Amino acid sequence: MSGMDERRNTFENKFAHDEDLRFRAIARRNKMLGLWAAEKLGKTGEDAQAYAGEVVRADFEEAGDEDVIRKITADFSAASVNVSDAELRVQLLDLLEEAAKQISAE
């Protein structure tokens, strides 16, 4: 194997590893965000876990975070929960940082 092939394989492996970590961190963040939102909605126990699963699944509707934000915003609006878009987005960023730390520690 040539040096260029080795470099390419190393790069591809690192890219695949980084993407796997990113996917896992986002999925964990979405679950944590779902549990946070469930608490705001007054859900506990199995209902909170089920809601967090709905938030995780909502992320598969389109690329990016807007599908998750749209779901939670709609649910908050329907339940008359007063959380601003800015507060929700800050929570999203904070929980991504926390999820990434947790994944790295594993």
Image (cartoon, rainbow, N blue to C red):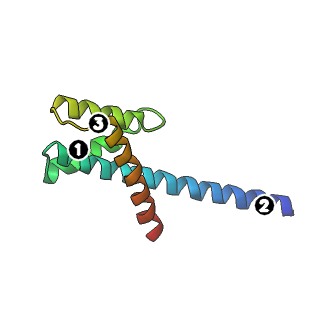
Identify the amino acid type marked 2: Arg
Mark-to-mark CA distance, 1 and 3:
20 Å
Left or right of 91 on screen, residue 18: right
Residue placed farthest to the right in the image? 2
Q: Residues within 10 Å of mark 2 (few under 14, many from 20)?
A: few
| Residue 101, x across and y down, in percent | 44, 64
Which residue lies under the disc numbered 2?
7
For residue 28, above or below residue 6: above
Q: Is residue 106 visible?
A: no
Q: Are marks 2 and 1 in contact (CB under 8 Å)?
A: no
Q: Could you say which is closer to the camera, residue 6 or residue 62?
A: 62
Label 3 residue SS: loop
Which residue lies under the disc numbered 3?
84
Identify the amino acid type marked 3: Ser
| Residue 98, x across and y down, in percent | 39, 59
Write the residue at 20% across / 46% down. 38
Write the residue at 23% across / 44% down. 51
Mark-to-mark CA distance, 3 and 2:
47 Å
Write the residue at 29% across / 36% down. 84
Quarter in which the N terminus is drawn: bottom right
Tell which circle, 2 or 1, labels the residue nearer the N-terminal end.
Answer: 2
Q: Is residue 94 visible?
A: yes
Label 1 residue SS: helix
Q: Which mark is residue 51?
A: 1
Q: Residues within 10 Å of mark 1 (few under 14, many from 20)?
A: many
Q: Could you say which is closer to the camera, residue 22 or residue 57?
A: 22
Identify the amino acid type marked 1: Tyr
Q: Are marks 1 and 3 in contact (CB under 8 Å)?
A: no
